[in-house]
Amino acid sequence: MAETASVQRRDPAKVMRLKRLGSLHQCRLSFMRILMRRLVRDQWQFDRPVFAIDENSTGYAVYTAHGPDNVYSLVAFAHDLDDSKRSDRVIAEAWDSTFALFDGIPTEEDISRLAANVPLQEAGRVSEKELTLSRANRSVRLWAHVVESLADGRQPDIEQLTAVGYLMRTTAVYGSGKFGAIDREMLAGREEMQPPFQAEMLTVFLIRTFVRDLVQHAANERGGERAARLDPSIARQLGIGNSTGLGMAPFIVNHPVLFSNWLMVKEEAIARVRSLQSATDNEKQLFLELLGRSDLLISQWHSQHPVQQQKLADLERDMRLLKSHVSNEILSGNQPWNRLIEWSEQALSVEGQELLASLVIEPYSELVDGLESCMSDSTSAGFQIDGSMAVKCIRHSIERDFGWALALDWDSPEHCARAWYVSEEKLEPRLGERFEEEIAEYEQALAPARDAVRAYKALETCPEDQPVAGFLLKYPQHRQSIRRAQLSEFAPYSEIRDNTISAELMPVDMLRAKLSFFGATFFDPRSDRWVRICMFAGAPYPEELSHQYDDHWVFPELPSTTANIEENR
């Protein structure tokens, strides 16, 4: 590997704009791919000790994952759901399948307890033996097509599978202590749970296997001996869908250090690659191969939302420009990746820029994969405000992170049109219209820019050298803003550089930012407040992990990879 000359991480003022956060793509540091590498590296073993599903495709199954130190079991319940009750909304009360990830191997008593609670989801209760609670609904038309096709002895239509991408979609994967499940801090000492959201990712990985087995079971019950087995190469194309709404959006505001760590790790990876003086032939070849595979991925990405449709059109144009550009020997010479990124900032849309930023780190596992150990947050929970810090230092932090916000008139309706609050019915975040609904008194602290400006104006009344403790004694309402300002000193990507309560806010940008780190693909907004995605499409199934592993499974295989590489050269 070539020696490096330092290129700095991108400026938070650029990275943390919502337009850019809402254009992030999965990368090799996404949580799904971190999980998959661990499963292969540590030679996890999987089995299905129970598959008690009847002729109506109802019952339960257990899938067990055996790691070097711990064992986890997905307990899956299949239900006969009336079509009229099928809903992806959080207010739903019944689902096609429900799940819990169990710590260890469940006994019959555990199964009975879970059977009485897991199908109820929020209305039930799990215990410290469970890591996650989840549920999923079928993609009804595709499910019926696959069952009918296999039962008739033939494979399902590839075009129909590609158009949807999944047979079931989860509508929630709860973890971290919700509804009685074990708190994340109780798992912090387990190596496999060190990176964020590994329990949730393992849950979805095992759900995908259950869904494949369940659709095969349904086809076998209908078709008997003439039923075909779903071709493994077709099964691998199927992921698990997910419907995500506003409930996820506040996370990146409420966990500033954690979110900063995710972004800082990715930006550090990009900076390391940009700093390389040259690229080897193998590195260039892999990049060009993945560029072609990304083009195929984009061709399978569809949306009915006008904003996303425009972004996809821009991305298709970007790919044409990018493939043409890299064919001109751009990858030769000094700091090729840095020059390519700099070119993209002038030539491509933000969507294309972020796709390229994710792609350039793909050939460099040895250079960047170790960063995955830096993505958790072990500091902010015990963080205490430094009362000795001078007022002028706090003001400087606010000016750096929210200088743009200081110029706004926060009394103007356009800048404070929205208010975040929590629904009493489901205890889920909602976004309301401040001047049309009586919600102001219920507003949550999810407008850090506005609150920082208020704190800044109050700080102007204090001497610059005064300790901030004295300020907070007089103005305790600004405690949260002072805390965030101090956190930002070691978490530079902690603050969104946009207004989270403006009339122009697109909450789906916040959703996509988080979901990109999960490793999601095929972002399909259904409004400005909820989005559908796909997870684990292209990934091997548990029984395939011992075979030759392609760490780039998220990119669809090209009909002829070699031919594509030569063409792009």
Image: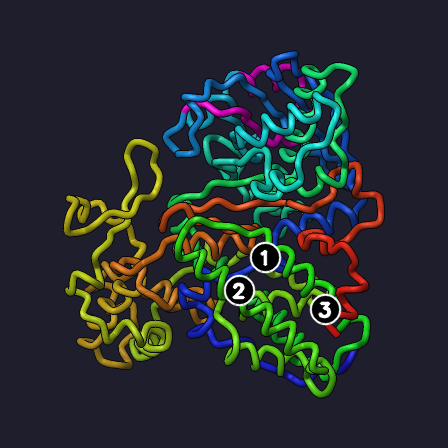
Q: In which quarter of the image is the C terminus?
A: bottom right
Residues in magenta?
93-115
Q: In the depicted view, which residue is nearer to us: 37 or 502?
A: 502
- The colour scheme is rainbow
Query: With respect to residue 501, does 453 lie above or below?
Result: below
Numbered label attached to residue 315: 2
* The stretch drawn in magenta includes residue 62: no
- Residue at (54% x, 50% y) in the render: 522
Q: Disc 1 marks which residue? A: 298
Q: Which amino acid does label 2 sit on?
A: Leu
Q: How far apart are marks 1 and 2 (CA)?
A: 8 Å
Q: Where is residue 312 in the image (x, y as percent from the top left)?
A: 50, 59
Query: With respect to residue 411, does 342 lie above or below?
Result: below
Instruction: Name which of mark 1 and mark 2 comes first in the sequence.
Output: 1
Mark 2 Cα within 10 Å, few/some/many (few <14, many 20+)? many
- Residue at (18% x, 47% y) in the render: 441
| Picture quadrant where residue 124 is located | top left
Question: In what element is the residue under mark 1?
Answer: helix
Image label count: 3
